[in-house]
Structures are given as C-alpha cells and as structure tokens.
Image: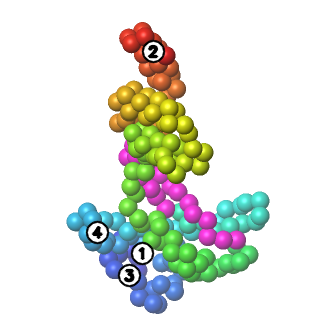
Amino acid sequence: MGIPAFRIGGFSGAERESTKYRNYEIINRRHSPQIGHTMAYQRGSLKKLRRKEGEIWVLRYRITKPDGRRVENTLPIGLVRNFPKEWDAWREADRLDLHTRINEESRDVRIHFDALAEQHLRNDFGADAVRPKTERTVLNTEHIVCTYLIPRWGDEIAGEIKPLEIQRWLKSLHGEKGLA
C-alpha cells in the first residue's frame, strides 16, 4: 500500500492516528470565494530544532515572496519537553490555529510612500498630534510633502526607496528649481 502524495478531503480517524500519514504534507483543495477557484491548502510538517532554551517543535510551511519565489518559513509550536510526542505537537498546532495562519492569502503588505506620508501628516501634524505644532510649521510641512515629496515618491514602495535616489533627487531640485 503506497502513501498518497495528494488526497482530496481528510483522512479517516484510523488513518489520522497512523504515524505514517502524519509525517507527510497533506494538500487538499478548497474553494476560495475571493479568488473564485480552488487553491492549495497546506498542512505543513513538524521539525525539531535546537534552541538555547532546549529543543522546540516548529511547523514548517511554504510562502510565496513578492518576487514569486517559494521559500520555507517556520512557526514555533513549543518545547519538546512540553510536547514529547509528535502527535502532541500536532494537537498544539491545532489549538494555536496555525493551519489557518499558514493558509491565509498572502497579501502585499508593502506600503506606498503617499500612504505613509499622509499617515505621518495626520499623526504628527493633525489636530490630535501628541506634540502639537504651530500653524506655520503645519502649513510648511504640508506644502513640502504635497508639492514635492508625494508627486515624486508617491507611487514608490516606501521600503524600496534608496538613500542614493533621494540624494540625487535633492541635488536635481537644487539645479532645476534653485531649491535645497
């Protein structure tokens, strides 16, 4: 009897209890209403790792990076001394609802510069700012952000803007408009 690489649906109770099935990643198909088609459902796999506090169980799973590469990622479950058997670690993973976390749609969480700038203006220069600014400071800052920064950097991912790009842009402002 071979062990199936893929299985539609779940295992029966007897199969689930069998260790030979727990050691393999099980991929189900489920319907995603957001996407409108079926998508892979990963269970992950368990692995023991040595850490300073002792051996721990981790749940291994794959994620897709923004550049399209698939890489392994891990989530800690607990110490091996607290969960001595692999089955105990699986139960703890279920209790922590880690399967839901690893199967959530990966969304692009990178923030664009314009959203970051608007949030900064709201939080640091708005009416409920922790340290209120003078009216002149608020007007000057809004003018610089809205007139120069957002038109140039608004569509860029904030974390991907390089300091050298900013230096070159500031130098161009000095030459073109007599600023900076």
Element on which disc 4 rests = strand
- Mark 4 / mark 3, whichever is N-terminal: 3
Marks 2/3: CA distance? 66 Å
Q: Could you tell whether 131 is left or right of 5 in the image?
A: right
CA neighbours of label 3 inside 10 A, class few (<14), some (14 to 19), many (20+):
few
Q: Magenta residues?
A: 61-79
User: Where does residue 98 sit, x and y in percent of width and height?
Assistant: 51, 71
Amino acid type of the residue that numbered disc 3 sits on in the rendered structure = Gly
Q: Which residue position is annotated with label 2?
A: 179
Which residue does the image show at 70% across and 73% down from the upper left?
80
* Quarter residue 144 falls in: top left
Secondary structure of the magenta portion, mostly?
strand
Q: Which residue position is annotated with label 4?
A: 32
Marks 3/1: CA distance? 14 Å
CA neighbours of label 2 inside 10 A, class few (<14), some (14 to 19), many (20+):
few
- Mark 3 vs mark 1: give the one in front: 3
* Quarter residue 93 falls in: bottom right
- Mark 2 / mark 3, whichever is N-terminal: 3
Question: Does the magenta segment cover residue 108?
Answer: no
The quadrant of the picture occupied by the N terminus is bottom left
CA neighbours of label 1 inside 10 A, class few (<14), some (14 to 19), many (20+):
few
Which residue does the image show at 39% across and 26% down from the upper left?
148
Marks 1/2: CA distance? 70 Å
Marks 4/1: CA distance? 27 Å
Numbered badge on residue 10: 3
User: Where does residue 136 sit, x and y in percent of width and height?
Assistant: 50, 32
User: Where does residue 39 sit, x and y in percent of width and height?
Assistant: 31, 65
Q: Which residue position is annotated with label 1?
A: 3
* Quarter residue 118 falls in: top left
